[in-house]
Amino acid sequence: MKTVSEYFGSLVFDDRVMKANLSADVYRSLKKTIDEGKQLDLSVANAVATAMKDWAIEHGATHYTHWFQPLTGITAEKHDSFISPSPDGRVIMEFSGKELIKGEPDASSFPSGGLRATFEARGYTAWDPTSYAFIKGKTLCIPTAFCSYGGEALDKKTPLLRSMEALNRQAIRILRLFGNKDVKYVRTSVGPEQEYFLITKEMYEKRKDLIYTGRTLFGAKSPKGQEMDDHYFGVIKPRVAAYMEELNDELWKLGILAKTEHNEVAPAQHELAPIYTTTNIATDHNQLTMEIMRKVAAKHGLVCLLHEKPFAGVNGSGKHNNWSISTNTGANLLSPGETPYENAQFLLFLCAVIKAVDDYQDLLRISVATAGNDHRLGANEAPPAVISIFLGDELTAVLDAIVNDTPYSGAEKKQMKLGVDVLPKFTVDTTDRNRTSPFAFTGNKFEFRMLGSSNSIACANIMLNAAVAESLKVYADRLEKAADFETALHEMIKNTIKDHQRIIFNGNGYDDEWIKEATEKRGLLNYRTTPDCMPHLLDKKNVDMLTSHNVFSEAELKSRCEIMLENYCNTVKIEADTMIDMAKKEILPAVVEYTAEVANAAASKKAVVADVACGYETELISRLSVVTDQIAGRTAELEEALAKLKTISETQEQSEFIRDVVLSGMNSLRAAADEAETLTAEKYWPFPTYGDLLFSVK
Ligand code: ADP
Ligand code: MG
């Protein structure tokens, strides 16, 4: 049997394979493109394409695809085979540099928010050489960007790469100011922790809501939920362990650094964390991970639920985006250094993040906004919709000392006034973890915890990179002009902390008192829902910032805003339609049937003993009748609301109607149906209950 280190990355056209299969010249040119973004010429592309094809065929591939991430949030692929006819009537296997670099999928059905209509009918895909090609099944997958002919991004990778470039540009300016001449590029890294639920396929197939929407739209609380905290980090059940083992194998073959796995808080909930890597690769890997999680589950008779809130009353699933900035020389810029001078640089980068998060709270909230995630944010399990930063006591004390010009009472008691060399040497405590903060500093990285489990991590990282690039730009503009660098630096750090102190909060983010303080005293934003936050994507300050760093054009922003709102509306509409269907065709018939059974039982009793009381039956029948009427009435109301929705043409207005009317209609229908479930005999209930679902995997 092969060991993990033997088969790790065996399906990836990675650096090792490139070195072995490309001539020294071609390898060097390609490396320059990967590391420094140098243009690739066609002869090099041809050589790479041939090597890639030969390697892929050796590994059983017959097809290739430009693998991309349209705005649907999932990945897309269109397979072409390598075959090409030869004069003797047979075929040869061909793949050219041109085919590697550019593809033209007929992509007219992907959402473009009006972009393609305005510019060009078709889009094209362009190879991203910074993310390795890999083999999935019999197909060589080439990670690509997806754009319109006018150059507008129609995907999530393009703006992500642009945001990384923006941050690189500004960070290099800062490093040069600190006298660093060696660093060639700066990149952000991400380690996304992925939460998910596993249930049996058998249970899943009996629930239309899970099939159509990925979450349960009905379901009374089961007698046991997560209250005992006995699942979190508990012993992994054999069936789940077998699943995780195969999942790891599949991920490792694709070079994905799956590292830790454990049970999460809710029953049937688990987590997988990879080792962090460069952001665009981490994004590709996370998309692949989600896909493979589902695929492997199917092989084990299981279904992997990636929805943010598959079950009411138990925790939903998120994705923690662990983010840091580092140089090509391996220095983590969010890590305090050995000397006060290094620490000054660290503090400046730290301040850049603090300023970015405060100035662009709205963009961060928008980057995680979906109908599914709205159920989590603001509930008692995920971070609130209000964004704040946790820094921990140590770092907060350092910052306080800087603002107040008072001695820092840490390891070295020094006055922190004027000039870099009096900034203290300190180390940051990495053990102090605040699990309730939406944006926590954890020693040498920030952990952004508001992402939904099914979200592509691209969106959050685009906004984060862009906002931090903007802070660094403001700093670099000022410092490059400063007469005395050290004084200017000290003042700037001090002013940033002063101006943005409101965003720092080390307390309990789940506390209602905090939400009050955050919004009323500190003036922080609290956008609870997608329709609340999404229009702010087009606020002038946001458009100005994102366009000035070339992360998005204004047209791209408008189209994205439209697409995200449409997605929100469609998601909820499908949910509402599913509820109506289940209520009419499954729930009402079941309750009516059970009521008739109870009535028959009472009648038979009375036939034997004429004046028997039948108190229980009578009481039950009247309660069942009340909820039956409620279910029927609320279903009709929901149908009416959906009919009204059809008459609204503006997407923003539609989304607000959904938020205010449709969702509350769904909640009240659910309440009645869930009560009916508690009154109805188990054998009459038409689909598996919460207890069945949450404890189905043995
Ligand atoms: P937790 O206690 O939150 O599970 P871990 O230390 O296990 O924290 O790390 C969680 C994730 O953070 C992992 O994916 C890990 O690879 C990632 N991570 C660790 N260091 C960094 C870093 N410098 N930059 C980005 N991600 C990192
Ligand atoms: Mg974490």
Image (cartoon, helix red, strand yellow):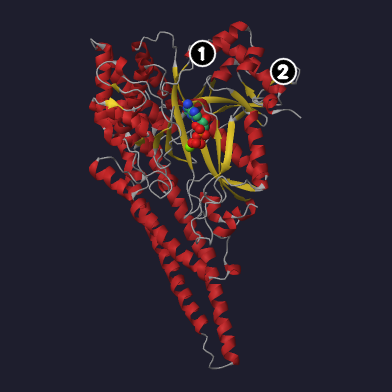
Q: Residue most toward the top?
A: 25
Looking at the image, is mark 2 or mark 1 nearer the viewer? 1
Ranked by sequence position, the earlier of labels 2 and 1 is: 1
Foreground residue among 2 and 442: 442
Q: Is residue 178 visible?
A: yes
SS of the residue at dot 2?
Answer: loop
Q: Toward which corner of the image does residue 103 lie, by quadrant?
A: top right
Residue drawn 54% across and 81% down?
A: 599
- Where is mark 1, residue-wise? 33
Residue 595 location, x and y as percent? 53, 76
Q: Residue most toward the bottom?
A: 610
Residue 525 location, x and y as percent? 29, 41
Q: Which numbered dot is residue 74?
A: none
- Where is mark 2, residue-wise? 86
Quadrant for the N terminus in the image: top right
Q: Is residue 455 visible?
A: no
Q: Give the CA separation, mark 2 to mark 1.
A: 34 Å
